[in-house]
Image (cartoon, rainbow, N blue to C red):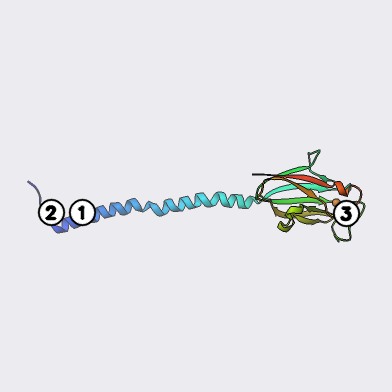
Amino acid sequence: METKRTPTERHSEENRSLARLARQYRLIPWISLLLLVAMIVPALYTFAQGPRVIQFTADHDNKYKVPGQKVPVITVKAKEVIKFRVTAHKGSETDPKYPGCVHTLSIKELKDQGWDVCLKEGMNEFILVAPSKPGDYKIECMSKCGKGHDDQNMKMTVTG
Ligand SMILES: [Cu+2]
């Protein structure tokens, strides 16, 4: 025999299915939170690590020297943020046009993007952003620093 359901029973049945639905959807905020954390943590980690450090020397003999390289070349990625740590030592002359600079780190076509840095005696730390266009660039010293100045340059390769 079929039992007839009263409106109240039907109502409570609807309520139960609503409760089931609510239970199913209760996880959504937690899943969203988990996804958010999963996205933020690697970003924070990268941020905390800071930019890649490139070290070299602009020496007494008016040469750029990269540790472990005979011919100095630095390789960066397009748009990469780079922290430079450059040790500079005075050559045989100082250029009155660049007071306080024993050498410079300059790339002619990128001067307006900050690639024209005065290097003072001792340790110089600064941050630059690599150009967006891949290719080979020439880092030069603009401060006339004595014998060898005209050949004081090194290659910077920008990869895509
Ligand atoms: Cu120089």
Q: Which residue is mark 1?
A: 13
In primary-sequence order, the first of circles 2 and 3 is: 2
Q: Answer whether labels 2 and 3 touch (C-beta < 8 Å).
A: no
Q: Which residue is mark 3?
A: 144
Residue 5 numbered tag: 2
- Secondary structure of the residue carrying numbered label 3: loop
Taking the image as shown, residue 29 lies to the left or right of residue 66, namely left
Disc 2 versus disc 3: nearer the observer: 3
Ligand 1 within 8 Å, label 3 CB: yes
Q: Nearer the viewer, residue 65 or 150?
A: 150
Taking the image as shown, residue 25 lies to the left or right of residue 111, namely left
- State the separation of the CA atoms marked 2 and 3: 99 Å
Taking the image as shown, residue 146 lies to the left or right of residue 76, namely right
Q: Answer whether labels 2 and 1 touch (C-beta < 8 Å).
A: yes
Q: Quadrant of the C terminus?
A: top right
Q: How many residues crowd around disc 3 within 10 Å: few (fewer than 14), some, or many (20 or more)?
A: many
Q: Answer whether labels 1 and 3 touch (C-beta < 8 Å).
A: no
Q: Nearer the viewer, residue 112 or 102?
A: 112
Q: Tell me the quarter of the picture where residue 155 sits.
A: top right
The x and y percentages for residue 147 are 92, 48
- Which amino acid does the dot numbered 1 rest on? Glu
Disc 1 versus disc 3: nearer the observer: 3
The x and y percentages for residue 117 are 78, 56
